[in-house]
Image (tube, rainbow, N blue to C red):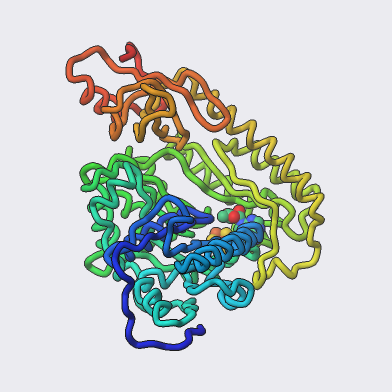
Amino acid sequence: MTDTPDTPETPLPAPGKKLFIKTYGCQMNVYDSDRMADALAPHGYRPVAAMEEADLVVLNTCHIREKASEKVFSELGRLRELRDERRERGEDLMIGVAGCVAQAEGDEIVRRAPAVDLVFGPQSYHRLPELIGRVHNGARVVDTEFPPEDKFEHLPAASRDVTVARGLTAFLTVQEGCDKFCSFCVVPYTRGAETSRPVAQVLAEAENLAAAGVRELTLLGQNVNAYHGLDGSGRSVGLGELCRRLAAIPGIARLRYTTSHPLDMTDELISAHRELDALMPYLHLPVQSGSDAILKAMNRRHTRGRYLEVISRIKAARPDMALSGDFIVGFPGETEDDFAQTLSLVREVGYASAFTFKYSGRPGTPAATMEGQVAEAVKIERLARLNELVTAQTRAFGVSLVGRVLPVLIEKRGRQPGQVGGRSPYLQAVHMQGPERLIGQIVPVEIVSAGNNSLAGKIVTVAEPNSASVLESRAMAARPEEPQQGATEI
Ligand code: 5AD
Ligand code: SF4
């Protein structure tokens, strides 16, 4: 850590400052950006929609793949120009870099991007007001240590107004860091060792969100299903039990969680899927490769067979479970035969959606220096073949839902007048004609067509008085595998 000069006083900026946070990467960064805004709100910073208007710009960065890191440096180039223009007008702009690039390459940022005032890692964002105070005192601050205190304890609870503005769905980080050390991955280095938030803290935040109108929570963690938070009696609680407690909070109708590791899909979590209607039948369960040799080199600690066995246990508990996955092509040593095994695994599982990546060597990870690095042209060609397969599967999954009635959480007005938009249990965007008063409700929607990225639907209900509450109760009762009979359009 470099931090010069070290100033004990931390004067805070004048009220009325404008903040713009640009978020890269995963949902955990989206959550972190919201928490940074919460931490700064009591100090007079309010979010603005455009970078050009801001007094403080923070890039909340992602380091997981090379492309993600490089984007940050090119954005810093643009920010430097913006600051120069400001200075010509006698104004100023403070530039901060947060997140995993900051954590991994703090000193490199300082060297390559002299316009940056403030660099801080994922464990320091609750100290942002103090760090900004130091910059105001003339310091250039780099704070990328893993401090021992619990950052969640120090963050202001999301205020009611702020949360309402964020809508009906919210992220909630319950776990951070990872101890798995997959050989390609920077997360154990940038986010540190695995930690879980205590149960009471998670429940309090969820209650706060529910009171502000949030109906769907997505629990976040780099290895979320390894969650093992302590309850009031000092007992370790798993993710299944946490979901049970969250589902009991009035107003919380839907729960999701991401991202999971196959080895942490415990029986307790799988049975929560059997028992809890609130747990949505959509699971993101990365496998990365279908080849045992590559899985071993990746240090994934599971085989293809073990992954398939986990999936069959999940499907036994929840037959309508839709699966999503992450895949890396061109990992060092991957042969054409290894890649063919990935394609065959994808065919065997049948994914509702998938995220596919070309392997990129990350500095400091074991795979970066492995022999047998795969040529870029081969990676590109494999990625295209894999994408063709997963795109066809996603489309086929959407088409398989046409004619079914799904409970859809209506989240917002649609793009066209008279339209509303929401999400299916399987996380697909669904748009349909409907009145705005349904926003916030879960309504039964007959799927009429499937596009590449979204579904079109028609709201259905029985012809009874007090249609809004009828809609609600019918939709909650409707499991997706049970198409509704005798439905009429409203
Ligand atoms: N190269 C390519 N993809 C990667 N991922 C993580 N590290 C790398 C890397 N070095 C992918 C994995 C992971 C997802 C978040 O990003 O598939 O699950
Ligand atoms: Fe990275 Fe996920 Fe592996 Fe952890 S389990 S090292 S976060 S890929």
Pick the residue in front: 102 or 270.
Answer: 102
| Rendered location of residue 440, percent (x, y) | 29, 35
Residue furthest to the front in view is: 89
Q: In which quarter of the image is ligand 1?
A: bottom right
- In the displayed structure image, the side of residue 175 where residue 399 appears, left or right: right
| Residue at horizontal 56 percent and vertical 39 percent from the top | 353
Which percent across, then down, holds residue 332? 75, 60
> Residue drawn at (33%, 67%), measured in percent from left and top?
152
Q: Residue furthest left?
A: 465
Q: Is residue 4 above or below residue 431?
A: below
Residue placed at 49% from the left, 24% from the top? Answer: 401
Q: Indicate left or right for 25 with 338 as reference.
A: left
Residue in front for this viewpoint, 396 or 264: 396
Q: In this view, does 103 lie above or below 354?
A: below
- Quadrant location of the C terminus in the rendered image: top left
Residue 244 appears at what percent x and percent y?
A: 29, 49
Is 14 in front, or is 351?
Answer: 14
Q: Can residue 431 be seen in this view?
A: yes
**Could you tell me if residue 236 is visible in this image?**
no
Q: Which residue is drawn at 59% across and 49% down?
A: 326
Q: Where is residue 200 in the image (x, y as percent from the top left)?
A: 25, 62
- Please tell me how many numbered marks the rendered image carries: 0
As drawn, 445 above or below 298:
above
